[in-house]
Amino acid sequence: MIKYPAGIKPKKGQEESEKPTKKKSLKAMATAANRGMGFESDINLTNDYYREKGIALIYKRPTPINIVKVDYTHGAKITDAYFETQSTTDYNGVYKGKYLDFEAKSTRSKTSFPLNNIAPQQITHLKLVKIHGGIAFFLINLALMDETYLLDAQYVCDFYDKKERMSIPFEEIKKHGHLVKEGYSPRYDYLPLVDEFFLK
Protein backbone atom coordinates (compact mmCIF):
# COMPACT_ATOMS: atom_id res chain seq x y z
CA MET A 1 0.00 0.00 0.00
CA ILE A 2 1.35 3.46 -0.96
CA LYS A 3 1.08 6.14 1.73
CA TYR A 4 0.55 9.55 0.15
CA PRO A 5 1.32 12.88 1.89
CA ALA A 6 -1.60 14.19 3.99
CA GLY A 7 -3.42 10.94 3.19
CA ILE A 8 -4.52 12.26 -0.19
CA LYS A 9 -4.15 10.00 -3.19
CA PRO A 10 -3.31 11.91 -6.38
CA LYS A 11 -5.88 11.90 -9.14
CA LYS A 12 -5.33 9.79 -12.21
CA GLY A 13 -2.64 11.31 -14.43
CA GLN A 14 -1.44 13.72 -11.71
CA GLU A 15 1.86 11.87 -11.23
CA GLU A 16 2.75 12.48 -14.87
CA SER A 17 1.70 16.12 -14.78
CA GLU A 18 4.00 16.78 -11.83
CA LYS A 19 7.15 15.81 -13.74
CA PRO A 20 7.32 18.93 -16.00
CA THR A 21 6.68 21.10 -12.94
CA LYS A 22 9.72 19.61 -11.22
CA LYS A 23 11.88 20.20 -14.29
CA LYS A 24 10.69 23.77 -14.48
CA SER A 25 11.55 24.42 -10.84
CA LEU A 26 15.06 23.04 -11.35
CA LYS A 27 15.52 25.29 -14.38
CA ALA A 28 14.38 28.28 -12.36
CA MET A 29 17.20 27.59 -9.91
CA ALA A 30 19.77 28.56 -12.57
CA THR A 31 20.59 32.04 -11.38
CA ALA A 32 22.72 34.62 -13.18
CA ALA A 33 25.58 33.66 -10.89
CA ASN A 34 25.28 29.99 -11.84
CA ARG A 35 25.25 30.84 -15.52
CA GLY A 36 28.41 32.91 -15.00
CA MET A 37 29.98 29.93 -13.28
CA GLY A 38 29.29 27.85 -16.39
CA PHE A 39 31.29 30.27 -18.50
CA GLU A 40 34.00 30.36 -15.86
CA SER A 41 34.17 26.56 -15.80
CA ASP A 42 34.71 26.54 -19.57
CA ILE A 43 37.54 29.08 -19.19
CA ASN A 44 39.06 26.85 -16.50
CA LEU A 45 38.93 23.88 -18.88
CA THR A 46 40.54 25.99 -21.59
CA ASN A 47 43.37 26.95 -19.24
CA ASP A 48 43.78 23.29 -18.24
CA TYR A 49 44.19 22.47 -21.94
CA TYR A 50 46.82 25.22 -22.36
CA ARG A 51 48.79 23.91 -19.36
CA GLU A 52 48.60 20.25 -20.43
CA LYS A 53 49.83 21.14 -23.93
CA GLY A 54 52.65 23.32 -22.56
CA ILE A 55 51.22 26.43 -24.24
CA ALA A 56 50.70 28.70 -21.21
CA LEU A 57 50.50 28.68 -17.42
CA ILE A 58 47.25 30.44 -16.46
CA TYR A 59 45.25 29.91 -13.27
CA LYS A 60 42.09 31.17 -11.67
CA ARG A 61 43.00 33.45 -8.81
CA PRO A 62 41.47 32.21 -5.52
CA THR A 63 39.47 34.66 -3.44
CA PRO A 64 41.11 34.98 0.01
CA ILE A 65 38.75 34.29 2.91
CA ASN A 66 39.14 34.53 6.67
CA ILE A 67 37.68 31.47 8.40
CA VAL A 68 35.80 32.30 11.61
CA LYS A 69 34.14 29.01 12.53
CA VAL A 70 34.59 25.37 11.53
CA ASP A 71 32.25 22.48 12.33
CA TYR A 72 34.25 19.28 12.99
CA THR A 73 31.29 17.02 13.83
CA HIS A 74 31.23 15.51 10.31
CA GLY A 75 34.73 16.21 9.04
CA ALA A 76 35.83 19.83 8.63
CA LYS A 77 33.07 22.12 7.36
CA ILE A 78 33.39 25.92 7.27
CA THR A 79 30.26 27.41 8.82
CA ASP A 80 31.29 31.06 9.10
CA ALA A 81 33.80 33.06 7.04
CA TYR A 82 34.26 36.41 5.33
CA PHE A 83 36.29 37.80 2.42
CA GLU A 84 39.63 39.00 3.70
CA THR A 85 40.28 41.50 0.92
CA GLN A 86 38.47 42.72 -2.18
CA SER A 87 39.15 40.50 -5.15
CA THR A 88 41.02 41.79 -8.18
CA THR A 89 40.62 39.81 -11.41
CA ASP A 90 39.69 36.21 -12.17
CA TYR A 91 42.79 34.94 -13.97
CA ASN A 92 46.52 35.50 -14.23
CA GLY A 93 49.57 33.68 -15.52
CA VAL A 94 52.45 33.60 -17.96
CA TYR A 95 52.34 33.25 -21.74
CA LYS A 96 55.42 33.44 -23.97
CA GLY A 97 57.36 35.19 -21.22
CA LYS A 98 54.69 37.85 -20.67
CA TYR A 99 52.54 38.35 -17.59
CA LEU A 100 48.87 37.98 -18.48
CA ASP A 101 45.89 39.11 -16.39
CA PHE A 102 42.20 39.12 -17.28
CA GLU A 103 38.62 39.15 -16.08
CA ALA A 104 35.91 36.82 -17.46
CA LYS A 105 32.32 38.08 -17.47
CA SER A 106 29.05 36.71 -18.82
CA THR A 107 25.85 38.68 -19.43
CA ARG A 108 22.34 37.71 -20.51
CA SER A 109 21.47 41.24 -21.52
CA LYS A 110 20.13 41.64 -25.06
CA THR A 111 21.76 44.99 -25.80
CA SER A 112 24.74 45.89 -23.60
CA PHE A 113 27.26 44.81 -20.97
CA PRO A 114 26.49 46.46 -17.58
CA LEU A 115 29.48 48.23 -16.03
CA ASN A 116 28.20 47.44 -12.55
CA ASN A 117 29.51 43.91 -13.23
CA ILE A 118 33.01 45.38 -12.85
CA ALA A 119 34.31 46.39 -9.42
CA PRO A 120 36.38 49.61 -9.10
CA GLN A 121 39.37 47.69 -7.70
CA GLN A 122 39.39 45.51 -10.82
CA ILE A 123 39.74 48.60 -13.02
CA THR A 124 42.56 49.90 -10.79
CA HIS A 125 44.31 46.52 -10.88
CA LEU A 126 44.14 46.18 -14.68
CA LYS A 127 45.48 49.73 -15.14
CA LEU A 128 48.49 48.79 -13.01
CA VAL A 129 49.03 45.61 -15.02
CA LYS A 130 49.17 47.73 -18.20
CA ILE A 131 51.51 50.30 -16.58
CA HIS A 132 53.94 47.52 -15.65
CA GLY A 133 53.98 46.07 -19.14
CA GLY A 134 51.61 43.13 -18.63
CA ILE A 135 48.83 41.99 -20.95
CA ALA A 136 45.37 42.84 -19.61
CA PHE A 137 41.97 42.18 -21.11
CA PHE A 138 38.38 41.07 -20.57
CA LEU A 139 36.65 37.99 -21.94
CA ILE A 140 33.00 39.00 -22.29
CA ASN A 141 30.45 36.30 -23.01
CA LEU A 142 27.20 37.48 -24.66
CA ALA A 143 25.17 34.47 -23.51
CA LEU A 144 22.01 35.11 -25.57
CA MET A 145 24.06 35.55 -28.75
CA ASP A 146 26.36 32.63 -27.95
CA GLU A 147 29.41 34.80 -28.68
CA THR A 148 32.48 35.67 -26.63
CA TYR A 149 34.78 38.64 -27.24
CA LEU A 150 38.27 39.51 -26.07
CA LEU A 151 38.34 43.21 -25.24
CA ASP A 152 41.51 45.13 -24.36
CA ALA A 153 41.39 46.24 -20.72
CA GLN A 154 42.54 49.72 -21.77
CA TYR A 155 39.34 50.24 -23.77
CA VAL A 156 37.14 49.03 -20.89
CA CYS A 157 39.02 51.18 -18.35
CA ASP A 158 38.67 54.28 -20.54
CA PHE A 159 34.96 53.61 -21.08
CA TYR A 160 34.53 53.06 -17.32
CA ASP A 161 36.33 56.29 -16.42
CA LYS A 162 34.34 58.45 -18.84
CA LYS A 163 31.07 57.43 -17.16
CA GLU A 164 29.08 58.55 -20.19
CA ARG A 165 26.75 55.59 -19.73
CA MET A 166 26.33 52.64 -17.38
CA SER A 167 26.86 49.90 -19.95
CA ILE A 168 28.91 49.10 -23.05
CA PRO A 169 26.64 48.52 -26.07
CA PHE A 170 27.16 45.23 -27.86
CA GLU A 171 27.95 47.04 -31.10
CA GLU A 172 30.88 48.73 -29.31
CA ILE A 173 32.10 45.40 -27.96
CA LYS A 174 31.96 43.91 -31.45
CA LYS A 175 33.65 46.94 -32.97
CA HIS A 176 36.54 47.18 -30.50
CA GLY A 177 36.71 43.54 -29.39
CA HIS A 178 37.76 40.33 -31.10
CA LEU A 179 35.54 37.26 -31.48
CA VAL A 180 36.94 34.24 -29.62
CA LYS A 181 36.91 30.97 -31.51
CA GLU A 182 34.78 28.37 -29.73
CA GLY A 183 35.25 24.63 -29.98
CA TYR A 184 35.41 21.42 -27.99
CA SER A 185 39.00 21.49 -26.78
CA PRO A 186 39.94 24.16 -26.03
CA ARG A 187 36.45 25.52 -25.37
CA TYR A 188 37.41 29.21 -25.78
CA ASP A 189 40.67 29.50 -27.72
CA TYR A 190 41.61 33.08 -26.76
CA LEU A 191 45.42 32.90 -26.91
CA PRO A 192 45.64 33.23 -30.74
CA LEU A 193 44.00 36.65 -30.25
CA VAL A 194 46.62 37.53 -27.63
CA ASP A 195 49.26 36.64 -30.23
CA GLU A 196 47.62 38.76 -32.90
CA PHE A 197 46.74 41.87 -30.91
CA PHE A 198 49.21 41.99 -28.00
CA LEU A 199 52.37 40.18 -29.13
CA LYS A 200 52.97 41.44 -32.66
Image (cartoon, rainbow, N blue to C red):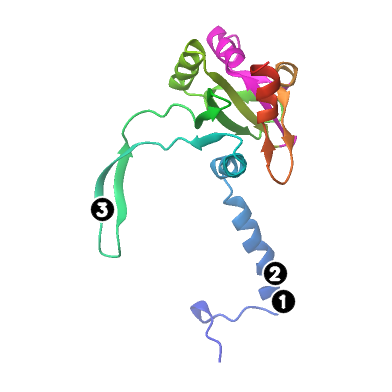
User: Residue under circle 2?
Assistant: 17
Q: How many marks?
A: 3
Residue 178 in the image: above or below residue 12: above
Residue 148 tag number:
none
Note whether 57 is above or below 131 in the view shown: below
Q: Is residue 158 left or right of residue 76?
A: right
Query: How much space separates mark 3 and mark 2, taking CA atoms?
Result: 43 Å
Choose between 57 and 105: the one closer to the eye. 57
Q: Which residue is mark 1?
A: 13
Determine the residue positioned at 64% across, 29% down. Answer: 140
Which quadrant would the N terminus be assigned to in this image? bottom right
Left or right: 147 as drawn, with respect to 58: right
Residue 149 within the magenta-colored segment of the rendering:
yes
Query: Which residue range is magenta in the image?
Result: 144-170
| Crowd class of label 1 (few under 14; some 14 to 19; many from 20; radius 10 Å) | few
Q: Position of residue 64 (x, y in %)?
A: 35, 36
Which SS class for mark 2?
helix
Q: Quadrant of residue 144?
A: top right
Task: Select label 3 or label 1 by which is in front.
Answer: 3
Pointer 3 or 1: first along the chain: 1
Q: Which residue is mark 3?
A: 70
